Image (cartoon, grey):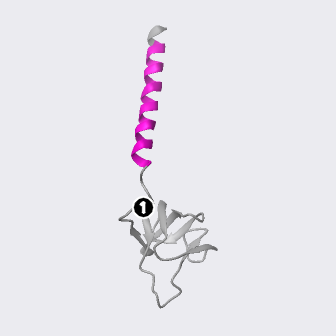
Amino acid sequence: MKILLFFGKLLAMHTFLMFAFVSSVTAGLGPSHVVCKLSPYGDNYLSVRACGDSGCREKFRIGPGEAVDVIDRSGSWRKVETSYGVGWVYGRYLCVNDNP
C-alpha cells in the first residue's frame, strides 16, 4: 500500500512540474504571426472567416500588422486567434512575427 501511495505522489509531482515548465516556457511568448503582404491598392484588410474557405461567412476584418496566433491549419488556411476573436484566414497573408 505504501508503495502505491509513493508512486501516486511521484506521479502527481511529475505532472505538476511538467505543467509548470510548459507554462513558464510559453508565458512570455507573444503572437506568433502578423498580417502582411496585403495590397495597399486593394481593400487593405484580411477577412477572418467562420471556416477555412472563401465561401464562408466573414466574421470580421483585420488590417496590416495585426498580431495573431495560429492555432490550427487546413490546407492553405490558418485558424487564428486575434484580439477580436477566433476565425480562419488565408495563410498567404501571414508572416512570422519577429517581435513577439
Residue sitting at the far bottom: 41
Question: Which residue is more in the foreground, 98 or 19?
Answer: 98
| Amino acid on which disc 1 is placed | Ser
Going 37% across and 63% down the picture, which residue do you hit?
A: 99
Question: Which residue is more in the foreground, 64 or 57?
Answer: 64
Residue 16 percent coordinates (x, y): 46, 31
- Which segment did they paint magenta? 4-27
Is 52 above or below relative to 20?
below
- Membership of 16 in magenta stretch: yes
- Membership of 5 in magenta stretch: yes
To which residue does mark 1 refer? 32
Is 12 above or below relative to 84?
above
| Circle 1 SS class | loop
Q: Tell me: 83 left or right of 25.
A: right
User: How many discs mark residues in the rendered view?
Assistant: 1
Going 44% across and 75% down the picture, which residue do you hit?
A: 93
Quarter of the C terminus within the rendering = bottom left
Residue 72 percent coordinates (x, y): 49, 59
When asked about the image quadrant of residue 53, the answer is bottom right
Residue 30 percent coordinates (x, y): 44, 57
Is 30 above or below relative to 64?
above
Q: Tell me: 60 left or right of 11.
A: right
Is 54 above or below relative to 5?
below
Magenta-colored segment: predominant secondary structure = helix
Going 41% across and 42% down the picture, which residue do you hit?
A: 24
Residue 6 percent coordinates (x, y): 44, 15
